[in-house]
Image: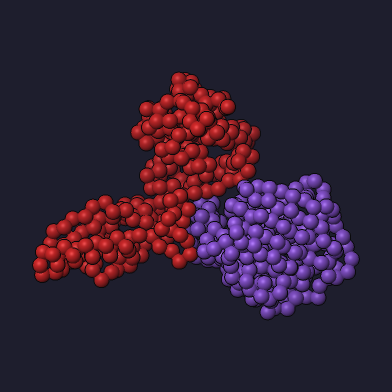
Chain colours: A red, B purple
Amino acid sequence: MGELPALETVRERAATARSDPGAVNLFVAAPAGEPLLGVERTPHDGKAAYVGETPAAAGLLAAAATVAADSERLRLHPPEPELTADGPWLVLEPLGGALGTVTLGRATVRVTVARGGDTTYGRLSADREGIAEVLAAARPSHDHYPVERDEQEVFTRGMTTFELSDVTVGTEVVLSLTASTTPATTPSEIRARFDREAVTDVAVDQLAGASRADPDDALREALERAHVATMGDYRYEWLPASSALARLPTANKLALGTGQPGEPFSVDAYEACRDVLEHTAEALEGAT
Amino acid sequence: MRTLAEPVSGEFVRVEPADEPGVRVNGIPADLDHTQKADVRVDLYDERTRAFVVEHVLGPLRLCGVTAADVVGTVETWAFARPEHRFCYSTDLGPDAVVSHPAGLPNPALADAVCEGDVRTPTEETRRSVREPVSYAANGGEITVSPRDHGTGVTLELRFEDAQFACEVPPEGAAGETIEAVTNATTPYLAPSPEEGVVHAVADVLSDVVVIGGLDDVHIEAELAAAYHALTIGVARRAAEEELVVERTGGVP
């Protein structure tokens, strides 16, 4: 069984890591802002793993701290990163081994349905039908792909998708939905999606557009080669709008990481991430 | 060597004649050295350029008897439901890097165009086979590639779940009904039945073992399972690594 660092070791390594000026910034995204909070190291499915509230953040920090402790070309930031630091950024997120440069956008959509029917029962029945019509329009559909049972988001990750957030019934029925948007999504496309008989108005408020980072070619190449060397290949996937990558105010950034959100972070995931970072650090050191 | 007399267009790709043996996709040679990914699909890679899902072009070309061609992707619009398109957008590649049909078909329009087009007079070429049977197992599947006589082409016996399919692909191309059946069969990942999936697999196996693996005169017997490109590319790699590939020259097949 491989070795997964004790949480205290991770803390020490993270606190003592030093770097050169101009080093590549390394940041571990943690949902609660503290990667190690509520996490413990314990066997899971026969292997050492971090489990608890934010196991992936803990595992990614363990990998980052282990490598940054021995490399001056990687500067590990604390949970609240210094956003104005010079140099490119690597954001560690549980991407299942993928790389990421694209974050999805977000919009809110208010769909208004007119109330009909002359009786209380008639109005309720019309409300139900109107709501069902809107929800049917909100469900993903595709000519070729089984998107209705796409639990891994193989296809729907790249589609405009909707999640119902609120239903208000007054003189009208208003459904509020949160939309995950792609670089191809337009407000008119969203309005057309809900152009149904029962719908009287569709208001789209784009909160953030999908965006694509533009990392240094040398850094991207170093990471792709590191993935090929350690995993046999590299791949890219898009990140949700809530990703830490989206919050960094620079285009020179890239996300990577093993593990899955909310799942135990195994020693295998730790070693894979550590190996990628080690190869990357070696490539960066070789380039200076 | 068999190549087209004139360029033809299928859906999503244009195919141009070539003066050298082998197929290139967006300039990348379709061979084992340039195969970067082989599991649920096959990608070729060369100096930061990548061609995605090439098996759905390489398969129909070989089904139609074409052994030398330059394939150029022609897709101009994004289809982000496809993971490959998201990959391309992430790395600043265009959608033309993806050369496959969105419905998972081995490009029936390309097969039609190639079959209707003329081929140049075939020229003598070095053809490859294996010295002895080569077997490989991966992802729950098994495959064996066995030698055939020079110039006799490929025979396949494939099984996928409870379904099986056998056919012959001589050097001049398969029978018309075989080409039509294979190129109109959906990938097992999306196919409604294993019967359709196993017919589709003929294009994938030809792509990987025969075109990319460079084995022209072989019998292929396979029990296919999940992510079977690891199996088909794997057996071709084993044949090459264990120096079991034999080259034979002579005559125009």
**Within the image, what quadrant is residue B65 found in?**
bottom right
* Residue placed furthest toward the front: B162
List x then y, in percent, for residue B224. Answer: 64, 55
Residue at the spot 85% in from the left edge and 68% down from the top edge = B124
Q: Quadrant of the image for the N terminus of chain A?
A: top right
Looking at the image, which is closer to me, B126 or B235? B235
* Residue placed furthest toward the right: B250
Instruction: Give above or below for A136 relative to B119.
Output: above
Instruction: Give above or below for A90 relative to B163.
Output: above
Residue at the spot 25% in from the left edge and 71% down from the top edge = A197
* Residue B203 visible in the displayed image: no
Q: Quadrant of the image for the C terminus of chain A?
A: top right
Number of numbered labels in the structure image = 0
List x then y, in percent, for residue A222. Answer: 60, 40
List x then y, in percent, for residue B196. Answer: 58, 65
Tell me: B128 left or right of B58.
right
* Residue placed furthest toward the left: A119
Instruction: Give above or below for A44 relative to A165.
Output: above
Residue at the spot 39% in from the left edge and 42% down from the top edge = A247
Looking at the image, which is closer to me, A126 or B141? B141
List x then y, in percent, for residue B102. Answer: 53, 64
**Within the image, what quadrant is residue B182 found in?**
bottom right
Tell me: B97 left or right of A49.
right
Residue at the spot 34% in from the left edge and 52% down from the top edge = A106
* Residue B130 visible in the displayed image: yes
